[in-house]
Image (cartoon, helix red, strand yellow):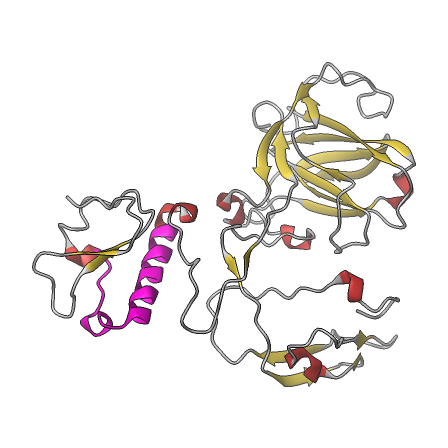
Amino acid sequence: MGIATNEKSVQPWPVADPSPGVTQLWRFDGFAKLMSSLSAAPSWGFPMPAACASRPRCQREQLRFICLVVAVLTGAVAQFGCGNEALDNGFTPSRTRTILPEQYIWIGSPSPDSSSPRFFRNTFVLNSLPTQATLYFLGPFNFDIFVNGMNVSHVQQGRPTIIHDQPVVVLDVTEYLRTGINTAAIQASAGGLLAIKILPEPQGIDGRGLLLSDASWRGTTVPTTGWEQPQFDDSLWSAVQAFGSIESDIHHFQGYFDLGMYQWPGYEGLSGILDHTPLSASAVLAIAPNGAAFSDPLVLTSASDDQNFRVTLSSDTQRSPSLMLDFGKEVAGRLEVARDPSRVAGGRGSD
């Protein structure tokens, strides 16, 4: 039986009587266990072609492929340390993204249906009122959200609309906030976790949260009258269970669970250990203004940060404007287009 160890290097693992074109199997850093049948059945392993054996880059790509396959099979990417080294193809990983601070929380056991609701409360202080405030909520299939005693959202869905997808709502709650102490209260059922945050920004814009779901929330399964009101004393309620960042568990990125989360500012739906590499466009291939006006699109192919690209929508714009960018290479991964809100030209109809 062959068991890979936690050695700090990549070493060949000889295979008895390899098949034609196969020189050796490979094991790699951080690989704690491997199925014992790998060495006994070479055809189950990951062969490295003989033509690849003398090419360091090819070896590294083969190794990365093994990392990917094993990670998919085991769901334990973080244990393998795959892909953090500089690549030979011009991509140099620049950073590991910090995952969002808001957490999934719950109280007690999962709620099977509307007959078993759970109740949550928290407070936050505002020294001044924001110009605009947006609430984001992912919850089970039934919930009511209260801000300072006012019911701002009621959902009675009961079950997924597709498979495993969780309801997500986005609300403008500016009018419900006040200076001083503010209270958020939630009744939720038919599920086993929720997440919430309120940002002092328009919808879709990230920022520092006024309120986040975390271990500071309190909850109960047996409320009393007035539980949703600001003056209610929740000191006898229990601390909630906090399950870590909404981006900390890769299982929440699967099976439509986070289908609605891409309207949640800052959410990527990616493991925090994945590399992020800046990538510049090399050409603009097609432009379809559809009634809008684009400033110089070639700015998008410039490495300089001194120029801005602007899209101005007209009142008669019927279809979304679009353009096609060529990045000059094939990329395995997701493309993330980000903007710096501090550099956006203000005013309605521009971005």
Q: Position of residue 78 (x, y in %)?
A: 43, 47
48 sits to left or right of 90: left
Q: Residue 20 appears in which quarter of the rendering?
A: bottom left
Q: Is residue 93 above or below residue 50?
A: above
Residue drawn at (19%, 50%) of the image: 38
- Specify the principal SS of the magenta part: helix
| Image: magenta residue range | 45-72
- Residue at horizontal 79%, vertical 66%? 343
Quadrant housing the N terminus? top left
| Residue 7 shows in the view | yes
Report the residue that reaches farthest toward the top.
Answer: 236
Q: Nearer the viewer, residue 1 or 161?
A: 1
Any magenta on residue 272?
Answer: no
Look at the picture and state if 151 lies above or below 38: above
Residue 71 within the magenta-colored segment of the rendering: yes
Q: Quadrant of residue 237?
A: top right
Image-based side of 321 in relation to 3, left or right: right
